[in-house]
Image: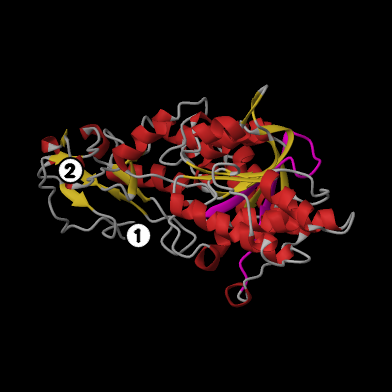
Amino acid sequence: MVALILDEVMDGLDGEQTVLDLTCGSGVFLVEAFRRLVHLQGLEMPLTRTRIRKALYTQVYGVDTSEAAIRVAAFSLYLAALELDPDPQPPEGLTFEPLIGRTLFVGDARTIEKTVAGTEHLIDDDGLKSFDVIVGNPPWSFKGKAGTADRRKGGGTLPAQPRGVGLDFLMRAAEFANPQTRFGMVLSATPFFSASKTGASAARHVVRALGPVTLVNLSNLRSWLFEGAAMPAMVLFARHRPQPTETLTIVQVPWSPAGPRSHTFEIAPSDIVRLSLDDWEARPTRLKTAAFGRRRDLRLIDDLTDGHQPLGERLRDLGTVLGDGLILGKAENRNRDAAYLTGLHYLQKDDLQPFAVPDDLPSFALTAAQWPRDRALYKAPLLLVKEFLPGQPRPLTAVSDRDLVFAEAFFGAPSPGRTSSSSSIWFSRPVVGAG
């Protein structure tokens, strides 16, 4: 992964550039970037210890909240400098100037320039020091109210990324950039592909601010490249290749059976799609289609959306909407009254059958929930649609002829005043399809 990113952002450089990683950890990106900078300089003239040490002391910068990680990063950079030294003879060859407090900093990336060391080394006469290459793998998410409060401390102008901070770190890094700075960052793919309006807004804001941008979708490699990750991954490249700033390039990395064994992957021309930013904003689903499909899939989606009325509009014509189900939540988060739902049958995630609601559902017996929803959402006749496809190409759906509470695993559209049979016809056709 580090090689993939640095291959792109350092292509065509001469080795005199500066590199920044605001969440450097133990320095994996920094060490490899340092090696490449020295190699590029060696292509122009023979390497000397003086030139190698100059690159070490002036060209590679990192920040992390962990002092232990920063110490490992410093040690790793020292070792790399020794390996590259053409004549590593003691004692001079084993003596280094300190990196910590000079190019490696312990602290919060959002305020690092306010520390004593940061003020001295990260602020120039005209503001924050700018870097030629910015790389990293910032945190993807946070948990709970403490994480929310911590995120708000950063302020900023980025639209709120739901339950995530990756884009915040990216835009913070952009404050250390100049118009030619190249970016290569590993991020969660969630805000780019989710249906969340706030997430999509944050993603578009970043892409417009840093354009031109290339997104490399690594979701298919999650099982071996990001084993254990709770979210799919992507790499965002910016300003590393010439292309129109209003064009977004999407690269899908396909899964292959050899990938987990060889830890390699292949990208074909058909895996690359370009999308205009205006088109993405007007039709958000096109980004996800481009990232997981091919050009023919985009054409298919275009044909469907241009030739058919959206489901939401069809349901509105019928006097209803498709709503999210009840979120029970953890016990400590059940702070909203749900007593008005007690006694109703309770449909949970594995209860629904194709075109049939079981008769023997349990009754809802709780008096509070995190998000109980309005009582009107549960009135019959009630269309029910499973949120995810159950391993087959057709949605799992049914119409209930009795009021019931349905869990968050479902969407529901009530239609009081219609008979169950007419609702089955009107609802099932737009959701399931006639064929």
Residue in view at x 60 percent, y 43 percent: 103
Taking the image as shown, residue 246 lies to the left or right of residue 399, namely right
Taking the image as shown, residue 332 lies to the left or right of residue 179, namely left
Q: Amino acid at mark 2?
A: Glu
Q: Amino acid at mark 1?
A: Pro
Q: Quadrant of residue 263?
A: bottom right
Q: For residue 279: magenta? A: no
Taking the image as shown, residue 396 lies to the left or right of residue 274, namely left
Residue at image mark 2: 332
Where residue 238 appears, as percent x and y from the top left, is: 69, 41
Residue at the farthest right position: 44
The front one of 232 and 295 is: 232
Residue in view at x 81 percent, y 48 percent: 13
Give the number of marks.
2
- Quadrant where the N terminus sits is bottom right
Where does the magenta region start and end?
231-256
